[in-house]
Amino acid sequence: MATRDTGTEENIKSAAKKVFFVEGKLNATTQDIANEAGVNRTLLNYYFRTREALFDQVYKEALSALAQKMNEVFKAELPFRQKVENIIDVFLEDIITYPFKEIFLISEINSEHAEIKKSHEPENPVFRNFAIEVEEAMKRGEVNRIKAPYHFIINLFSLMAYPVIIRPLNEKLLNFTKEEYDEILKNRKSEIIELLLN
């Protein structure tokens, strides 16, 4: 039995991540990915029998990598403001690297065969614990006035994700070049902190 070349497999997965999550080609074919990886489609099919199998693999790996980084930040024993700054740093770095990953997540959640629905767990304890930290920060007056801690969490992730997801439209509507919009994204952290924290 032939052994699998992990280097080739990783090359295919990297190409798929670029096609799906960087270039945003939602309907990319296995041939598109094979071309990007510099391999023939037969070889790609040897490692991943279908486009869906390849997508599921790279998507799960991308989500898992971000979740691991985010969990480390959420669990860190840090002052509240510093923790929020670190959350912004980690999330923005990921979403700027893979600008279309969030769109794929929304698409996957809304699909009938969504794995995320099948494996849905109750409330994530990491977020529950962070909500407690938000509530404590509210009592100390560190957070701008909101009705509940979960509004802070929703606002935080909305302020980080939305400008990247809506980037193509914003560039056209506001007449920004790619370089100008990159600069805006680099400055998001200070804007978010100012909006959410006292």
Image (cartoon, rainbow, N blue to C red):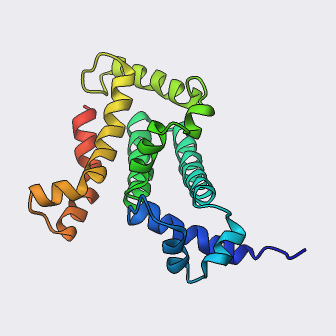
Q: Is residue 125 left or right of residue 164?
A: right
Q: What x and y, as percent, mark residue 6? A: 73, 73
Q: Residue at x 48, y 43 (%)?
A: 108
Horizontal side, residue 27 vs residue 67: left or right: left
The relative height of residue 91 versus residue 7 in the rendered view (above or below) is above
What x and y, as percent, mark residue 187? 24, 55
Name the residue rendered at 61%, 75% in the picture.
11
- Front in this rendered view, residue 166 or 44: 44
Q: Nearer the viewer, residue 125 or 28?
A: 28
Q: Residue visible at 45% across and 24% down?
A: 131
Q: In front: 45, or 9? A: 45
Whole-percent x and y of residue 68? 59, 47
Q: Is residue 77 visible?
A: no
The answer to which quarter of the image holds residue 125 is: top right
Q: Compared to 101, does 155 lie above or below? A: above
| Quarter of the image with the C terminus in it | top left
Query: Which of 64/43 is in front?
Result: 43
